[in-house]
């Protein structure tokens, strides 16, 4: 199979199986193989389809005609700043997040809005979506658009579907949390994200962009100018 077609197929398989297993197939499979069996199956399918997509991505190679020149300083300054915001969202998303699988999810949903949840109730999903968008912005090649586009689509559509699933699973607890938080990010909320999210985000941002040099040979983030 042509590597680009394989990448498209792998990306569709990764996104499609994620949605299918997370929503229509979840209840019948849990009823058949149990919660632990379902988690094992879900993880196996996710890993297999993601590895397929990544291997196909590498097989396509870095060539291809970009849709625009993503290497200009203006684009990279914007991408660097937005990736910092994405890193703050990701770092703060683990603190008392009602969306995460946790026996205390309903208790967390009843807490006052805190940290990165002043920005959005889906900080982890938005961090993935921003990561995907910035990779397309700086490298708008066919393989990047397919893989990063699939991951960004999965993050945002998955966040929307997660609201529906949590409404069914958590009832009034999630409905109350929804009424006090936002789906779309509020930029002013970063001022209330808290020191842990900001410190963790800066560490992740610096480490991830530095690792980009060794992974791809392309300086990213501030290392583009100070490395």
Image (cartoon, rainbow, N blue to C red):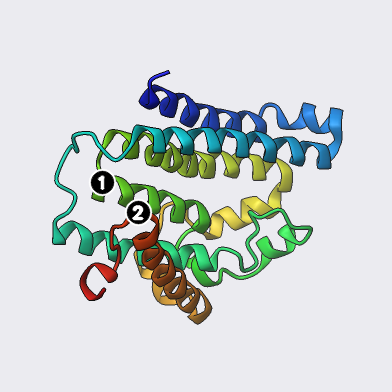
- In what quadrant of the picture does the C terminus appear? bottom left
Query: Which residue position is annotated with label 1?
Result: 139
Residue 184 appears anywhere in the view: yes
**Residue name at image x 15 percent, y 42 percent:** 68
**Residue name at image x 74 percent, y 35 percent:** 41
Q: Is residue 47 above or below residue 186?
A: above
- Secondary element at tag 1: loop
For residue 216, the mark is 2
Q: Is residue 180 above or below residue 144?
A: below
Count of numbered circles in the view: 2
Residue 97 relative to residue 214: left or right: right
Q: Where residue 50 appears, x then y in whole percent?
A: 54, 38
Residue 20 relative to residue 73: left or right: right
Residue 115 relative to residue 71: left or right: right
Closer to the camera: disc 1 or disc 2?
Answer: 2
Q: Where residue 219 appears, x then y in whole percent?
A: 28, 63
**Residue name at image x 73 percent, y 64 percent:** 107
Residue 117 appears anywhere in the view: no
Label 2 CA crowd tier, 10 Å (few <14, some 14–19, many 20+): few
The quarter of the displayed image where residue 6 is located:
top left
- Secondary element at tag 2: helix
Q: Where residue 33 appears, x then y in whole percent?
A: 85, 31
The quarter of the displayed image where residue 18 is located:
top right
User: Residue 100 versus residue 149: which sits nearer the camera?
Assistant: 149
Cα separation, mark 1 vs mark 2, equals: 12 Å
**Residue name at image x 49 percent, y 28 percent:** 10
User: Residue 193 versus residue 75: which sits nearer the camera?
Assistant: 75
Name, please, the residue furthest toward the bottom. 195
Q: Where residue 137 appears, x then y in whole percent?
A: 25, 48
């Amino acid at each position: 199979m042509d590597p680009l077609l394989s990448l498209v197929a792998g990306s569709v398989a990764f996104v499609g199986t994620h949605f299918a297993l997370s929503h229509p197939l979840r209840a019948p499979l849990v009823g058949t193989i149990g919660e632990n069996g379902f988690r094992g199956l879900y993880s196996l399918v996710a890993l297999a389809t993601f590895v397929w997509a990544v291997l196909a991505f590498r097989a396509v190679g870095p060539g291809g005609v970009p849709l625009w020149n993503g290497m200009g300083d203006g684009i990279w300054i914007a991408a660097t700043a937005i990736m910092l915001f994405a890193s703050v969202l990701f770092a703060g998303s683990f603190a008392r997040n009602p969306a995460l699988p946790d026996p205390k999810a309903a208790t967390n949903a009843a807490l006052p809005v805190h940290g990165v949840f002043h920005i959005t109730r889906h900080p982890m999903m938005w961090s993935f979506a921003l990561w995907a968008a910035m990779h397309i912005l700086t490298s708008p090649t066919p393989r990047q658009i397919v893989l990063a586009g699939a991951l960004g689509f999965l993050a945002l559509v998955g966040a929307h579907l997660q609201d529906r699933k949590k409404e069914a699973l958590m009832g009034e607890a999630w409905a109350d949390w929804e009424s006090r938080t936002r789906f779309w990010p509020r930029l002013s909320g970063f001022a209330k994200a808290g020191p842990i999210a900001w410190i963790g985000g800066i560490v992740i941002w610096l480490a991830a962009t530095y690792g980009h040099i060794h992974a791809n040979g392309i300086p990213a983030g501030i290392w583009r100018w100070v490395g």
